[in-house]
Image: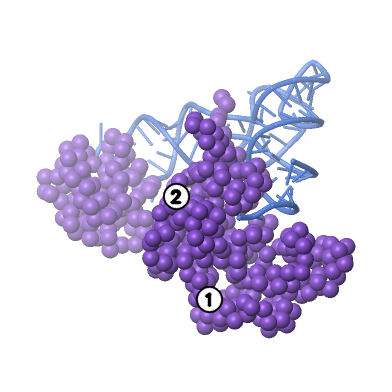
Amino acid sequence: MTMIQKPRGTRDFLPDEMEQRREVEGFMRRIAGTWGYREICTPEFEELELFTIRSGEGIVGEMYVFEDKGGRMMALRPELTAPVLRMYVNEGRTLAKPLRWYYFADCFRYERPQKGRYRQFWQFGVEQIGADSALAEAEVIMMAGEMLAASGISFSLHVGHLAFMRSLLSGLEPGDQKKARMFLDKKDNQGLEGYFASIGQEDLASSLTSLAGCRDLPSAFSLTGDIPEKDRICELFSILDAAGTRYELDPGIARGLDYYSGMVFEAYAENLGAENQVLGGGTYRLAHLFGGEETPSCGFAVGFDRVMVSRGEKSRQAALVVGIASTPEGLEYALAAASRFREAGLRTELALSGKSLGQQLSIVARSADFALIIGKRESDEGMVTLKDLRSGAQKILALDDAIAEVKGSEPR
RNA sequence: GCCGGGAUAGGGUAGUGGUUAUCCUGAGGGACUGUGGAUCCCUCGAGCUGGGUUCGAAUCCCGGUCCCGGCCCCA
């Protein structure tokens, strides 16, 4: 028999794994919510152009692109920032600023899968639109740190600012600037030095590598001088310090993208391999690309699947389960009892097969913490027999007392 | 796209160019008819795929697929 395989780079999730994912997702949602961010949702696919405007034609080869029946070129979303900003321009422009939005959504990229990299993957992202202050930037950084910490992973949060590098590179041709950013992003100092030597800029190469190694503001400014952004940068970092945020200054973050305008930040998980970046973000201006006013924005996206990989297998407290075994005479009462248990929020499962009570109990005992036994005797008396499957103790109780007893106990 | 390593029941595994492929676990059914995961019995279930070498291939060779590690890329 030939079985149909799942598409390359996709995954199936069994209930155990889904429960873990939902739990972590819940941590992130809760934090976003407490910072005043509210959930939005955009289409799974968009016009291809939305993504090429932002990132160039080069990305088409790495997207799921298709022509719909009306002849339009569409793409499954490879990320959410462009769709969110498109949404903002389409229908959010008259809302009071700043907007605080978040999303949890799957994205698609046609790339070679490896650990922590899949063709369908999930991002938890935050976009803050229409504020332009150090505090606004600090807010998203602090929230990002809080989310990763709540996820239970070990990570380091690196915060930088593009102004440092831009000031050093300002004298170069755009092509050389891009090249330099590429080397810096890869932390390839040898490549950088070699390239700069070839264009007669050895001094600049050493300044850049020093900059990338700076871990405090005074040494960074000693390389760049008093750049116009200095006050704003100092303010940002003093807010982070005041808030007790754990971060590392990293002026070497290049984030190869043209639309990032200032602050940039990334986080790396400590126990992942080549794909160890679990979060990326920064300040950007994008709305004007999609027909809106130029709008200061900042945000980040968490690579949710990498967070899950980094967490590893975490044992999770299972939900309390009640199983019901009944005889034919007790079935009607058992059904009523089951709905009462469920109304009380308890996970309640009827034994779906098994002729005898003993058989039903052995089925129920595989997954349940408590067994509710309901036969003719219970039905006649309006009572239930509640058996604690962990201790073996059982007692005959009124329905409400049985519910209270179960609710008052701990899962196994 | 590049380099390398893999692929044996649902999961985890052993093994050899030669009978009927090993073990653990799992799943289903039955015995047990008002007391439990037990026990007993039965059943299900595998060498990724397509070619080649060979009397004979799960084993050796080649292509493909998928997974893993690294590179590239990373919106």
- Above or below residue A134? Residue A52 is above
Chain B tint in image: blue
Q: Chain of mark 2?
A: A
Residue at horizontal 35 percent and vertical 47 percent from the top = A365
| Residue A220 position in % (x across, y down) | 70, 79
Does residue A26 appear left or right of residue A165 in this picture? left
Residue at horizontal 45 percent and vertical 46 percent from the top = A43
In front: A405, or A261?
A: A261
Can you tell which mark lies on residue A134?
1
| Residue A316 position in % (x across, y down) | 45, 58
**Residue placed under numbered mark 2 in the picture:** A42
Can you tell which mark lies on residue A198?
none
> In the image, what residue type sits under mark 2?
Thr
| Residue B47 position in % (x across, y down) | 66, 30
> Quarter of the image holding residue A289?
bottom right
Q: Secondary structure at mark 2?
A: loop
| Residue A97 position in % (x across, y down) | 41, 67
Chain coloured purple in this rendering: A
